[in-house]
Amino acid sequence: MERRTFLGGAMAVAVVGHGSRALAQQPPIKIGMSMPQTGGLAGGGKASLLGIEIWRDDVNAKGGLLGRKVELVVYDDKSSASETPAIYAKLVDVDKVDLLFAPYATVPTAPIMPFVKQRGLLLMGNFSFQVNSKVGHDMWFNNAPWGPADSWAASFLDLAQKAGGKNMALLTADQEFAQNLAVTARDVAKKRNIPIVFDQVYPPNTVEFSSIIRALKAAKPDIVYVASYPPDSAGILRAVNEIGIGDSVKIFGGGMVGLQFAAVMSNLGSLLNGVVNYNTWLPEKSMYFDGTKEFFDKYTKRAVEAKVDPLGYYLAPFGYAMGQMIEAAVAATKSLDQKGIAKYLRENEHKTIVGPIAFSADGERKETATLQAQFRGVKDKDIEQFRSSGKQVILFPDKLKTGELISPFEAARN
Amino acid sequence: MDLLLGAVVLGVLLGCFYAAVSVGLSVSFGLLDVPHVAHPAFLVLASYGVFQLNESYDIDPLLAGLIITPLFFVFGLLAYRVYHETFERRGSDAAVRGIAFFFGIAFIIEVLIILQFGVDQRSVSATYIGKAWRFGEFRIPIRQLVAFAVALALTVLLAVYLSKTFMGRAIRAVAQDEEALRLMGANPVRIKQFAFGIATAVLGIAGALLIIVAPVEPTLDRAYIGRTFCVVVMAGLGSISGTLIAAIILGVAESIVLTLFGASWAPAISFAMLLGVLAVRPQGLLGR
């Protein structure tokens, strides 16, 4: 063999080899996030992450995004607001992720908003409440169904007023999320001339609610609006059951975090009956869209191994939907350009397993899809009962409604 | 007036419960000078033990608490032995390093609970949970009455044990003068180890009360660390009857504030009262 031919051949092999290796080794698309996997928000965080992981596996099974595999880079933020700024700086500057998802919940998300705004980064929100209202970042899109800030309190008070409620008691946790709810509830009540006869903010770590419930009962309210966090929701309902809340109460609940999680629901059992509370997804016939059933089939299997919420209604399908929106936007814009993706997300309606999603200018839903549902006929110690329809009847919004409110509260408890 | 009376009654019940969860610390920290910041973590661990027995075998939570008590006694013996060998034996700054040791243990317990049980809240079922005794308009949760009775019995038993039995008096002696005890031919380390075992064993019952009163989650220990230390210091270090009195005062004060003045002030109450008591009586209510 002549030397030149040999060299030429070798070079050709090298070039071809390099080319095919480049194709095989196309780097994955990295999506970075922190997620509470320990601490108070961990129950929700783990379920949310499982929803996102199921989306990742589905999208990778279909060949990935832009022909590249999707990889998640996830750190535990320990449910703490002080951890997230450093984690997101690391995700962007060290891990060089392509896209960012926010951690579950308001508290860990709030401190990263200035960072993403300053850097001009797209952030897919994950169940935060009103974190963008003051920051005004135009590349923020929240997967939660909240909608306009006051719609939450307004929908509850609509139901309450229809049931004849004329004055209100407010019991709220001293926490960012609950206080945001309380502020809007006070505003809506003021606009509608509903006097507030009891307004108490209780601190985290409150062990015993009997005393508070006695004081609340003494105020004889018609409407009781509660914005509580998971450890307290159980304590409050137990105390209500033991101390009683009085015959005057037409409707009770509204913003109790925790009653969406299987372990808490199963623990409380029949104590839940009659409570009207917010929710995001429920196994009622109006809530099934393309892919919803398939998603829950997968989730139910994987939740057992992952030791996360066996039902997973509250967060997991929205984690999946967050992925679906990114999938659609990247496919439509054929790039990872964050400005382009943000423009697409803002201007289009997106089909997801939790229904169609359209965003308003602030990155929240154009219309609220937050459910208000009443617990009915719940038995003690039975998680499986919550998989059937009718245990949480949807009262709001109208297009998803599956029943009417039973009032007063005491009548709905039996 | 009705509200105030109700607040006082509920406060006494709550206070006795606080005494039950603090009385072990009164022995380990108050009498033995062990900086046992893992005390509330041990307490939560006991609650999970009770939960497991209740969930798997449908055993009543109080009985489950009794069943795990001997296990916790052995656990206490081991924990003290490790602490003594690695820290206490080695010198005067043992207390400071001991805090790090017990903080470490607390975190390990938290993580182990999360690995085993997950992060969700857990609670137990029993016939007395979720019901109330009625006196006309006034209602008292039965779970709190149960916690009150058991807590009272536990505290009184421990106080009698420490003052009337030979071993109890030896434990008090080691707290007062370790050197003198050594000169009498007794081994202070073994006595302290035994006392630490007792302090930990008590947590079996206290853990049962904790999960009877409210659901537990792995990081619940953080909510109790301030309260338990506050009760023990306010009581006067090592005083069991003082622990009961301090806990009842704290429970009543908290309950009155929660009912009449607004819940946001409640957490400040324990520390405000602690500061008040220490300003007037630096040795605590019944401290010597």
Image (spheres, grey):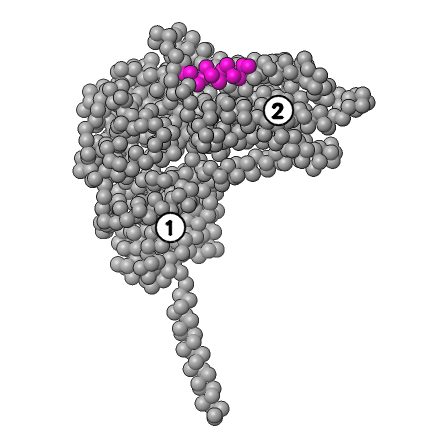
Q: Any mark on residue B199, and which? A: 2
Residue at 67% from the left image edge and 26% from the top image edge: B194
Whether residue B15 is visible: no
Pick whichever, B14 or B193, lies toward us.
B193
- What is the chain identity of the residue bearing mark 1? A
Residue A218 is inside the magenta segment: no
Q: Point out the residue furthest to the front here.
A: B57
The kind of secondary structure element at disc 1 is helix
Tell which tag, 2 or 1, sits nearer the viewer. Answer: 2
Q: Quadrant of residue B271?
A: top right
Image position, residue B213 (x, y; %): 45, 22
Pick whichever, B117 or A120, lies toward us.
B117
Residue at 37% from the left image edge and 50% from the top image edge: A53
Mark 1 lies on residue: A53
The kind of secondary structure element at disc 2 is helix
What is the span of residues highlighted in magenta in the rendered image?
B141-153
Q: Is residue B41 left or right of residue A167?
A: right
Q: Is residue A188 left or right of residue B250?
A: left
Residue at 77% from the left image edge and 21% from the top image edge: B181
The amino acid pointed to by label 1 is Glu
Pick whichever, B282 or A399, lies toward us.
A399
- What is the chain identity of the residue bearing mark 2? B
Image position, residue B135 (x, y; %): 37, 8
